[in-house]
């Protein structure tokens, strides 16, 4: 009798421990999924890591009589595209809204979808580099040999001159890296029709966005 009585609290305690462990595991998984969008939001708000700001208005409201040079950089990572800025740099007035252009050409023999990420250097300047229009984080599909003009519209916030570490800044570098995006084939069309072309890949044109 005594042994049976002592085993009941132990079973209850084991159940509590198991429930706590399960809740902890579930919470950690949830935090892992939330970490990426939360980190991205943090970077966009603060400019941390060279993340630029998405401008809510197209103009700074004032333009300073002071020049700053914007350098443009382009890289590819695992995608057979020729991706480059049309101009390597531009010198503008701080606060002036400016448009620059990148060019992408698909060098492969089938449609390829790409997506660009970006940052600016120095990293602290990211909080003052405002994008009005940008192709970043937008899926873009190019046919074999197709070339696409990819504009980016931006301005440098005049408040940058009030930051002690940036008040004498002369140059900002805007850098993009293009990655391939794998398109998943619908289940209903995963098996090719008899006599069909097994190399056919669905192609949808992506619009340019912010």
Image: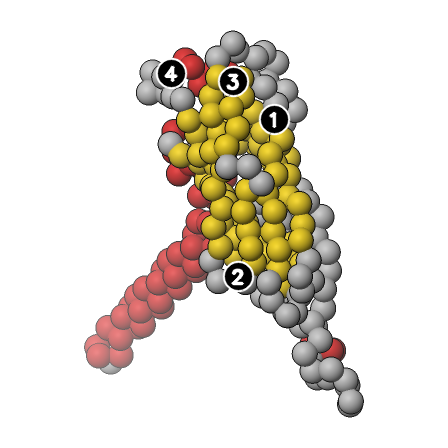
Its colouring scheme is secondary structure
Q: Residue furthest bottom?
A: 194
Where disc 1 sits, the SS reads strand
Pick the front one: 64 or 89? 89
Q: Quadrant of the N terminus?
A: bottom left
Name the residue carrying label 3.
Answer: 94
**Residue 56 appears in the figure:** yes
* Mark earlier in primary sequence (1, 2): 2
* Mark earlier in primary sequence (3, 4): 3
Q: Position of residue 79 (x, y in %)?
A: 53, 61
Please give left or right for residue 209 compared with residue 62 in the image. Answer: right
* Mark earlier in primary sequence (1, 4): 1
* Mark earlier in primary sequence (3, 2): 2
Mark 1 to mark 2 CA distance (whole Å):
28 Å
Near mark 3 (Cα within 10 A), the count class, few <14, some 14-19 or many ≥20, is many
Residue 164: name its quadrant.
top left
Q: Position of residue 193 (x, y in %)?
A: 77, 86
Near mark 4 (Cα within 10 A), the count class, few <14, some 14-19 or many ≥20, is few
Q: Is residue 3 above or below residue 122?
A: below
Q: Is residue 182 above or below residue 156?
A: below
Residue 79 is tagged as 2
> Marks 3 and 1: in contact by CB < 8 Å?
no
Mark 4 to mark 2 CA distance (whole Å):
38 Å
> Marks 4 and 3: in contact by CB < 8 Å?
no
> Marks 2 and 1: in contact by CB < 8 Å?
no
Q: Quadrant of the C terminus?
A: top right
Name the residue carrying label 1.
Answer: 98
Where disc 4 sits, the SS reads loop
């Amino acid at each position: 009798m005594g042994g049976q009585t002592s085993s009941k609290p132990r079973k209850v305690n084991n159940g509590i421990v198991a429930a706590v462990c399960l809740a902890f595991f579930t919470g950690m998984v949830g935090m892992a999924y939330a970490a990426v969008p939360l980190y991205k939001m943090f970077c966009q708000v603060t400019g941390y890591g060279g993340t630029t700001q998405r401008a809510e208005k197209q103009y700074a409201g004032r333009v300073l009589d002071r020049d700053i040079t914007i350098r443009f950089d382009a890289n590819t990572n695992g995608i057979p595209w020729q991706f480059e800025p049309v101009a390597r740099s531009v010198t503008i007035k701080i606060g002036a809204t400016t448009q620059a252009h990148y060019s992408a050409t698909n060098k492969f023999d089938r449609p390829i979808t790409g997506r660009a990420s970006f940052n600016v250097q120095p990293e602290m300047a990211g909080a003052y580099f405002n994008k009005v229009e940008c192709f970043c984080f937008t899926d873009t599909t190019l046919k074999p040999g197709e070339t696409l003009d990819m504009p980016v519209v931006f301005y440098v916030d005049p408040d940058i001159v009030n930051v002690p570490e940036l008040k004498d800044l002369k140059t900002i570098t805007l850098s993009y890296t293009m990655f391939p995006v794998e398109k998943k084939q619908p289940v209903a069309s995963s098996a090719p029709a008899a006599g069909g072309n097994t190399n056919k890949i669905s192609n949808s044109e992506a619009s340019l966005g912010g």
